[in-house]
Amino acid sequence: MLGRFSLRSSSRSLSVRRLRAGQSWAERLPRGTGLVGVSAALAAVALTGFVASGRYESFVVEQGRPLDFIARMCGFGVRRVTITGISRMYEREVLAAAGIDWRSSVPFLDVTEARDRLLRVPLIAQASVRKIYPGDIVITQVEREPAALWQKDGVINVIAADGTVIDAMRDDRYASLPLVVGENANAKLPEYLALIASAGPLADRIKAGTFVSGRRWTLKLDGVDVRLPETDPAGALARLVRLEGRDKLLEKDIIAVDLRMPDRVVVRLTEEAAAARAEAQQAQKKKPGAPT
């Protein structure tokens, strides 16, 4: 009986396979498949026309991406954004930088992309973006602190301690910051700040520092240019501190002090002082018995 049953089963299976092999593709498909296929084709054509006509772009501008739109309709729109660590930026600037607005949705917000966008803002040193369902976004950021002003080609920018440009000089908020001038002077800011710290009683009188030829500093003190050497500028500045304490050098009629040579100090007089000195020398020569 087992043998007969197996044989009958094999024969029946073979006949079914032969029957199915004789069917057309249309007969093999489940009922309703044709209707679904036609509907999908029509939908594809409609979508193509919707995109080609420009109405899709208009929809995205007005309502956001389709997935965001659907998520908002389901109650997952961004209802509140909490920003911590903000001090010099406006909230609207942070949101615009992160790419978050009323069209966004929590499920389809890419927090990694939003964080990367924030880090492209020079003023922001660190940032994180977190989603809290159903409708909250939390942004935590650390802003760079303004450390100095940098002037190059007549343009003044605000820079951080590492020399990064973080803002343009638009008002007087940063007017009290140290000023460095010249090519790559921003990258040498730590060196300049160290010079100011080593200037002792002259520190408050230093108004600016110009980085010359990518090698050395010239300081501006109360209208007097102080030219420092490439090597050991702090030592040369210490010499100036001693000279000022002993001879009040900077109170004299001079416009420049050259400290680039270790064994001497060269000063440049103002035009009036130079003219007066020249007249005094001529008068001295005219005196009887004066050397000629």
Image: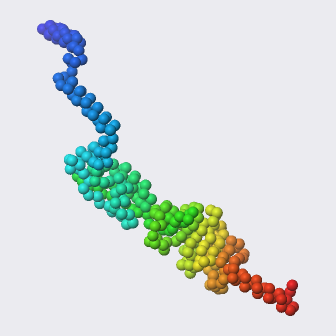
**Residue at x 56% of width, y 78% of height:** 205
* x then y, percent, for residue 252: 65, 84
Which residue is outermost to the left? Answer: 1
* x then y, percent, for residue 65: 30, 45
Write down the quadrant of residue 33 in the picture: top left
In this view, the residue in front, 38 or 240, is 38
In this view, the residue in front, 136 or 155, is 155
Instruction: Judge left or right: residue 158 versus residue 233.
Output: left
Which residue is outermost to the bottom? Answer: 288
In this view, the residue in front, 61 or 143, is 61
In the rendered view, tell whether residue 165 sits above or below residue 245. above
In the rendered view, tell whether residue 181 sits above or below residue 97. below
Instruction: Judge left or right: residue 186 versus residue 73.
Output: right
**Residue at x 40% of width, y 52% of height:** 116
Q: Considering the image in quadrants, where does the C terminus appear?
A: bottom right
**Residue at x 31% of width, y 34% of height:** 48
Q: Is residue 262 visible?
A: yes
* x then y, percent, for residue 79: 24, 56
Write down the quadrant of residue 220 in the picture: bottom right
In this picture the colour scheme is rainbow
**Residue at x 73% of width, y 82% of height:** 275
Q: Considering the image in quadrants, where does the N terminus appear?
A: top left
